[in-house]
Amino acid sequence: MVNKVTLTQFIIEQQRGLPDASGTFSMLLNNIVTACKEISHLVNRGNLVGVLGSAGSENVQGEVQKKLDIITNDIMVNALNWTGHLAGMASEEVDDIITIPAQYPKGKYLALFDPLDGSSNIDLNLAVGTIFSVLRCREGVDPAAEDFLRKGAEQVCAGFVLYGPSTMMVLTTGHGVNGFTLDQDIGEFILTHPNMRIPEESSEFAINMSNQRFWEPPVQRYIDECLQGEEGPRRKNFNMRWIASLVAEVYRILTRGGVFLYPFDLREPSKPGKLRILYEANPMAFIIEQAGGACSSGRERILDIKPTGIHQRVPLVLGSKNEVERIVAYHQLG
Ligand code: AFP
């Protein structure tokens, strides 16, 4: 493979730049990558192997689980629990934190993940993905839920895998954002999108318009001004996208800019948004900021929010910095 940098090589070369690195984190990352390769294979096979459709159960969020929600969760847990790198895990699909079985050693990291984001798309053959976040944990202890309730600014790594026409992994460890494409012939992720950056300006927004009557005034104002186009105060026309798969929306924004909104929803004030802070908003916020974008709840920087629950939801606005800052300014004006 002349001039092809594999993800394995990339991780090891990044580790060399950290003098006190033990290599544990690199091995953990490789375990996550292996799990995502297995998920990619299953998502690609779909009904050929009978993994589509509903599982006939609900998760802690009260959402109907797809078979693949459960299968992919098991793949992630079984790929990580034996490694000795983790003290515990948290998953969208599991009510409580996931402890490490007694027969395995514990490590110094916590892994948090949404094993299959966008799963309502899976039966439609549309893009889905896996989102993951890694935190350091107090060593040698059995973590409790509060060990996971850490600000997103404390993450040591965040990434997602988009199972689309290509299987793409996007990764940050706090030194920029890099994209890798899975070469199915050799089973390796290849560095294809080094140093991904988000344009500060954009004319594209992503929001589920069917919820418009439930938005707060600042979001109503922002979207209304976009819809007025060049005759309105923005003096330009906008395009809209809604894929109903956060990983796909974020990947599009990383490649051509834009802004994604899943805002506070007046329907159920107890559910301040749809997306969960620990394993969706925080990892995406880390990636977006590392790529030069911004990520807010509308009222505060996502990475500064102190979580209060494993499955806590937050309003989410992310993407091109100038658009996010405009939306935040509208919230400040009330
Ligand atoms: P599912 O995993 O239940 O499909 O939810 C996906 C998601 O959390 C996120 O990936 C999408 O951006 C958002 O929900 C779509 O929400 P709507 O279905 O309300 O449009």
Image (spheres, rainbow, N blue to C red):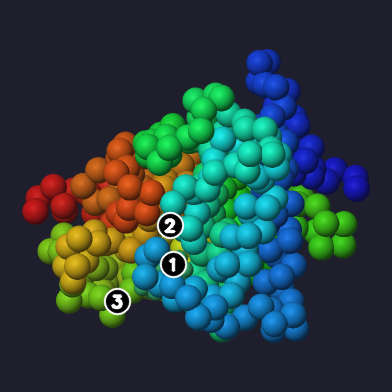
- Most distant residue in the left direction: 334
Q: Would you name the residue on which mark 2 appears? A: 95
The crowd level at tag 1 (other Cα within 10 Å; few <14, some 14-19, many 20+) is some
Which residue is disc 3 drawn over?
A: 209
Q: Secondary structure at mark 2?
A: loop
Q: Amino acid at mark 3?
A: Met
Q: Is residue 24 above or below residue 49?
A: above
- In primary-sequence order, the first of circles 1 and 3 is 1
For residue 51, which quarter of the picture?
Answer: bottom right
In whole angstroms, how far apart are the C-alphas of marks 1 and 3?
Answer: 26 Å
The residue drawn where x is 59% and y is 75% is 67
Q: Residue at x 77, y 41 (%)?
A: 8
Is disc 1's CB within 8 Å of ligand 1? no
Residue type, label 1? Asn
State the CA–CA distance, disc 2 to disc 3: 30 Å
Q: Check whether the beta carbons of the residues at disc 2 and disc 1 lie within 8 A of each other.
A: yes
Tag 3's secondary structure? helix
Ligand 1 image position (quadrant): bottom left
Q: Residue at x 52, y 48 (%)?
A: 98
Tag 1 residue: 59
Residue sitting at the far top: 19
Residue 183: where, in percent of width, then height?
A: 80, 59
Query: Which of the pair 126/25 is nearer the observer?
Result: 25
The nearer-to-camera label among 2 and 3 is: 2
Residue kind at label 2, given as amino acid type = Asp
Residue 42, percent across and down?
71, 70
40 up-or-down from 284: above or below: below
Which of the two residues, 145 or 226, is positioned nearer the viewer here? 145
